[in-house]
Amino acid sequence: MTNGNNSDQYTFQNPVDRYPSIAPPVQDQSEPGLDKDMTPHVDHGEDTYRGTGRLEGRKALVTGGDSGIGAAVAIAFAREGADVALSYLPEEEPDAQHIAEVIEKTGRKVVKLPGDLKDAEYCSQLVEDAVAGLGGLDILVNNAGKQVAVDNLEDLSDEQLDHTFKTNIYSFFRVTKAALKHLPAGSSIINTTSIQAYEPSPNLLDYASTKAAINNFTKGLGQQLAPKGIRVNAVAPGPFWTPLQPSDGQNKEDLPEFGQSVPLGRAGQPTELAPAYVFLASPESSYVIGETLNVNGGTPSP
């Protein structure tokens, strides 16, 4: 998907209709879902994100970088001058290959590092491989997430609870811990949280709980690392059209109205999130620490 007019993120335009108001048909994918199989397709900014050199020479690791939010962030970072390492599940290889090709066409280096963030050993090895492949590391984006809707707590299995917490919050601790010995002063850590941290949907109890934990982790770690010159912040997306949604992240019957309840009246496209991450990664946000930047189409949040 593109926004239909070849404009970039700097073009003056009404945000209500900058991107189409989608009404996704009822559809189903097995986890983790693929961008290439979604209807409608997702806009990562392949044709529209214009960089201005704000991250020239930087080296970034993005988890969940194959699709959705992570893919849009990876493309934006590359367009801003950064080399990027992508972490993703092996079964997401088709999406990861597409994003890698976009980054390579930008002229930046990309390192693909498939694996499962539920595995503590992979979390540590991921960082070492990213550092080796990129020649260093100064941006870490903890973004990968698991979201599966369950209407009743009685039906939430221990296995799902374990997988959600290991993916959504344990990996943030583990990957960040492994990265710290490599991050110089001036580095930036950015965590993806959610509007669910403030307004939890009743069928996303495990997912929403991890997102609240990410907010707390961000604020505490931000204070801990500030004296070292490493900034920690978070981005809290609202309803964005990503593979999480059709792969059991929403009840199927709710998909046609996905995102239409926010004040802007439409779901967001991942490319609309990318500038928030670029801002928090760049030196222009040097006095911003422990912040959760909400990008949610107008929903009031703390």
Image (spheres, grey):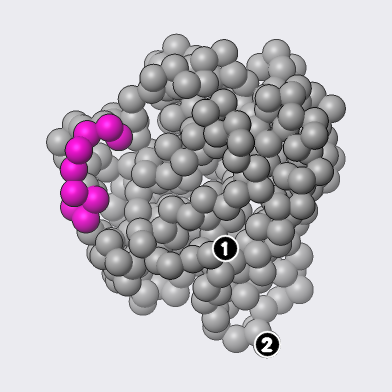
Q: Is residue 160 above or below residue 62?
A: below
**In magenta segment, residue 165:** no
Secondary structure predominantly adopted by residues drawn in magenta: loop
Q: Quadrant of the N terminus?
A: top left
Q: Amino acid at mark 1?
A: Gln
Residue 143 can be seen in this image: yes
Which quadrant would residue 131 be assigned to in this image?
Answer: top right
Residue furthest front in the image: 287
Tell me where residue 237 appears, x and y as whole percent. 48, 55
Foreground residue among 155 and 197 = 197
Task: Provide the secondary structure element on which disc 1 rests.
Answer: loop
Q: Is residue 215 above or below residue 93?
A: below
Residue sitting at x 31%, y 47%: 41
Label 2 belongs to which residue? Answer: 154
Which quadrant would residue 180 be assigned to in this image?
Answer: top right
Foreground residue among 134 and 99 = 134
Q: Which residues are magenta?
A: 9-17
Residue sitting at x 57%, y 13%: 57
Label 1 environment density (alpha carbons within 10 Å; few <14, some 14–19, many ≥20): many
Q: Amino acid at mark 2?
A: Glu
Tell me where residue 225 appears, x and y as whole percent. 78, 38
Label 1 belongs to which residue? Answer: 147
Tell me where residue 158 appears, x and y as whole percent. 76, 73
- Which numbered disc covers residue 239? none
Tell me where residue 155 appears, x and y as whole percent. 65, 83
Residue sitting at x 37%, y 74%: 254
